[in-house]
Image: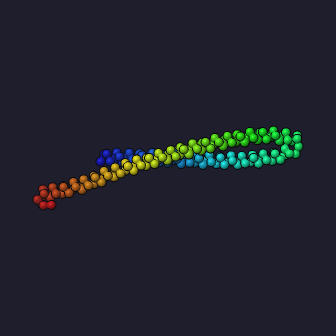
Amino acid sequence: MPQTEERVDAIEREITGIRSDIRLQNHMLIKCGEQMSDLRTGQHELQKGQDELRATTAELRIGQDELRKGQDELRATTNELRKGQDELRATTNELHATTAELRTGQEEIRETLEEFRSAFAVVLDEVRQQKAWREEFSDKVARVIAKSEGLDA
């Protein structure tokens, strides 16, 4: 019986670990959602920057003086867009890394679940064996009592 209790305790500890892993995964999914929101915002800003770039190009056609001014603005905007692209790339890389971590976590949970199922099968088998032994022992005790009382069982 102590071995069964120890195994049940071990299984409960494993379940607690699994729950912790699931909470961590949920946290990582929330983080991933936040990063996706940041990515969408960045994409919107990039589109907005591209629209501004088009407007600047139209103004450049007005005149040579304005052309120079527009070129300076264009350079500044391009630098901002490059920074935005770099940030988007970094965010995308972070998302890929987070996705890989999530997949690793999912695999670990699958493995833990499989171990839990195996351990549970062993415990269940032991419980069945103990039940069978108890029934056999009860029958033998009943026969011994019956014999000792002079009855034939």
Q: Give the image location of residue 71, x and y in percent.
A: 81, 40
| The image quarter in which residue 135 lies | bottom left
Residue 62 relative to residue 88: left or right: right
Residue 12 lies left or right of residue 80; in this view the side is left
Colour scheme used in the picture? rainbow
Total marks placed = 0
What residue is shown at x 75% (from left), y 46% (from top)?
50
In this picture, residue 34 sits left or right of residue 12? right
Residue 148 locus on image (x, y percent):
12, 56
Residue 88 visible from this viewpoint: yes
Q: Residue at x 71, y 46 (%)?
A: 46
Considering only vertical position in the picture, is 72 above or below 147?
A: above
Q: Position of residue 62 (x, y in %)?
A: 88, 45
Q: Residue furthest bottom?
A: 152
| Residue at figure coordinates x 68%, y 46% from the top left | 42
- Residue 97: image quadrant is top right
Q: The C terminus lies in which quarter of the figure? A: bottom left
The residue lying furthest to the left in this view is 150
Question: Looking at the image, which residue is at 49% across and 47% down?
Answer: 106
Between 55 and 16, the residue placed more toward the observer is 55
Q: Nearer the viewer, residue 19 or 105?
A: 105
Towards the viewer: 4 or 124: 124
State whether residue 12 appears in this view: no
Against 40, is 80 above or below?
A: above
